[in-house]
Image: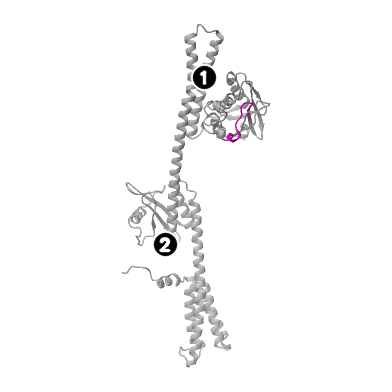
């Protein structure tokens, strides 16, 4: 047994000299018709018969390839020499002068047949390559949809079966050996074959299975196993291309998963830092105010007049409500971070809920004018009452925090294009135009430098998450009222439209 590079001639003959039954039948038909035509034109001379055979050989090669052309050339030589040249019915040549035309005929027939056959073979090879490229392109497009390593296995099995007509699955090494990654049970023969490929990538045999060990960076041994379901042999180079494509997809999915995990960790760390900063500041301020008011009442309660005592007690109540709102905001933000808002929905009157929020916010409004304008008080929306009120309170609280005494705050509720539109506008400080989109980010505060300590930076983020969870939209615009301030616009689907 010898090893080394394969003989090019053997490879050429193996690749080219192949003729199936259909090709043999076409060659026989062409040769029969050529022979009949050659006999028909024989009275015109041997040259006419020879040209007819040359044409037939060319047609045979063009139809069925090089093997057909060689067979037709050999058969035409025998027929022409036996029947059409003198002396007839023998392969002997009468004179030496008859040898030259016969040799020229054979050479012309052979050359024309070989050229036509090669053209046909090249066309078939190009068509086969084009089909393979299209299959690889389709497979690549399918694999691009796999975002996670677990998705790659399902996509490979589905795409290989649909595009290549083969069963396929992946095996990966773990502490117990090779493990089948398919959701379906794998046959024992597949396990044995995959083990053989894992330890000897060049293993061969009579098995109908085809396997490739995938070259993956920083990953355990992975083996791709295929079983063709269609007749015909799949070229090794094509299998290698499929294996490389699957390997690249696995690496891309693994890297994408790592990037996603790192981003999630970074977001969690950022949220944790912001949360600690928010808690340390936003909880300490109300607690300090409560402590100061309570201490004053304890120390000087008997010396304080009724109005001062009531003001201190009102301050304690307001700061307690402020703490309660901060706690509710943090709780709802944690729920949204954990996977969304899952709260029971009820059919609510938008104007009624806005009125309840106004009633709660008025004690903190001071000298600000807070009004509600609702031409249709019965506009229904589907929402959770506590969260809906929390959203309105957060927006109203922002309007009060970032406006001066005497400013106006207005809630307007109306129907617009099958939705309930809620506008909360104020004549306060307003939001810089460059910050209109960022005000809905967690822990972002906009405003003058002397107001950056106000609020937790969660109110509008909570409002955005809640509104979008209900299929609505929320955005901020400037100005609000009297050419100043901010306008927050909420659009929620009407409950009637949702039910329809």
Residue at (50, 69) in percent of width and height = 122
How far apart in space, not on screen, are marks 1 and 2 (Cα)?
76 Å
Residue at (49, 63) in percent of width and height = 129
Name which of mark 1 and mark 2 comes first in the sequence. Answer: 2
Q: Give the range drawn in magenta.
A: 422-437
Q: Is residue 351 left or right of residue 79?
A: right
Regarding residue 263, the answer to whether it shows in the image is: yes
- Work out whether 330 lies above or below 232: above
Q: Quadrant of the N terminus?
A: bottom left
**As drawn, which residue projects farthest toward the bottom?**
95
Q: Position of residue 155 (x, y in %)?
A: 46, 50
Circle 2 residues within 10 Å: few <14, some 14–19, many ≥20: few
Residue wearing tag 1: 319
Check if residue 70 falls in the magenta segment: no
Q: Which SS class for mark 2?
A: helix
Please tell me which residue lies in front, 488 or 141. 488
**The image quarter in which residue 365 lies:** top right
Q: In this view, does 7 lie to the left or right of 438?
A: left
Q: Is residue 423 left or right of residue 205?
A: right
Circle 1 residues within 10 Å: few <14, some 14–19, many ≥20: many
**The image quarter in which residue 403 lies:** top right
Q: Where is residue 140 in the image (x, y as percent from the top left)?
A: 49, 54
Q: Which SS class for mark 1?
A: helix
Residue wearing tag 2: 236
**As drawn, which residue projects farthest toward the front?**
449
Please tell me which residue lies in front, 420 or 37. 420
Q: Is residue 406 left or right of residue 285?
A: right
Q: Quadrant of the C terminus?
A: top right
- Work out whether 194 lies above or below 39: above
Q: Position of residue 407 (x, y in %)?
A: 64, 23
């Amino acid at each position: 047994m010898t090893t080394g590079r394969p003989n090019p001639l053997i490879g050429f003959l193996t690749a080219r000299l192949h003729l199936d039954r259909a090709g043999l039948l076409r060659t026989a038909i062409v040769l029969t018709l050529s022979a009949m035509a050659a006999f028909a034109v024989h009275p015109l001379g041997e040259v006419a018969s020879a040209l007819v055979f040359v044409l037939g050989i060319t047609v045979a090669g063009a139809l069925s390839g090089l093997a057909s052309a060689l067979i037709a050339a050999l058969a035409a030589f025998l027929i022409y020499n036996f029947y059409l040249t003198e002396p007839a019915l023998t392969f002997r040549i009468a004179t030496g002068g008859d040898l030259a035309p016969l040799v020229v005929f054979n050479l012309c027939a052979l050359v024309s047949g070989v050229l036509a056959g090669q053209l046909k073979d090249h066309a078939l090879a190009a068509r086969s390559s084009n089909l393979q490229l299209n299959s690889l392109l389709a497979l690549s497009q399918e694999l691009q949809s796999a975002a996670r390593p677990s998705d790659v296995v399902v996509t490979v099995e589905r795409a290989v079966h649909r595009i290549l007509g083969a069963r396929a699955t992946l095996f990966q090494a773990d502490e117990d050996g090779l493990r089948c990654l398919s959701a379906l049970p794998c046959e024992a023969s597949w396990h044995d074959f995959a083990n053989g490929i894992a330890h000897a990538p060049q293993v061969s045999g009579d098995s109908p299975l085809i396997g490739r060990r995938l070259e993956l960076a920083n990953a355990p041994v992975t083996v791709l196993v295929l079983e063709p379901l269609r007749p015909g042999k799949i070229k090794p180079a094509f299998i290698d291309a499929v294996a490389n494509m699957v390997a690249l997809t696995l690496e891309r999915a693994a890297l994408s998963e790592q990037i996603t995990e790192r981003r999630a960790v970074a977001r969690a760390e950022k949220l944790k830092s912001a949360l600690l900063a928010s808690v340390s500041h936003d909880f300490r301020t109300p607690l300090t105010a409560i402590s100061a008011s309570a201490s004053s009442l304890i120390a000087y309660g008997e010396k304080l007049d009724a109005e001062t005592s009531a003001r201190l007690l009102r301050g304690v109540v307001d700061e307690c409500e402020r703490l309660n709102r901060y706690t509710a905001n943090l709780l709802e933000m944690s729920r949204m971070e954990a996977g969304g808002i899952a709260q029971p929905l009820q059919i609510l009157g938008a104007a009624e809920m806005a009125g309840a929020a106004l009633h709660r916010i008025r004690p903190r409004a001071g000298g600000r004018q807070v009004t509600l304008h609702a031409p249709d008080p019965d506009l229904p929306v589907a929402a959770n009452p506590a969260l809906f009120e929390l959203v309105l309170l957060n927006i109203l609280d922002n309007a009060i925090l970032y406006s001066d005494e005497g400013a106006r705050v207005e809630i307007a509720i109306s129907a617009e294009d099958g939705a309930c539109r809620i506008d909360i506008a104020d004549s306060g400080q307003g939001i810089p135009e460059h910050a209109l989109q960022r005000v809905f980010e967690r822990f972002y505060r906009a405003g003058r430098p002397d107001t950056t300590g106000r609020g937790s930076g969660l109110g509008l983020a909570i409002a955005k998450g809640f509104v979008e969870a209900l299929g609505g939209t929320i955005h901020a615009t400037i100005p609000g009222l009297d050419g100043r301030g901010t306008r927050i616009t909420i659009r929620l689907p009407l409950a009637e439209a949702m039910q329809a």
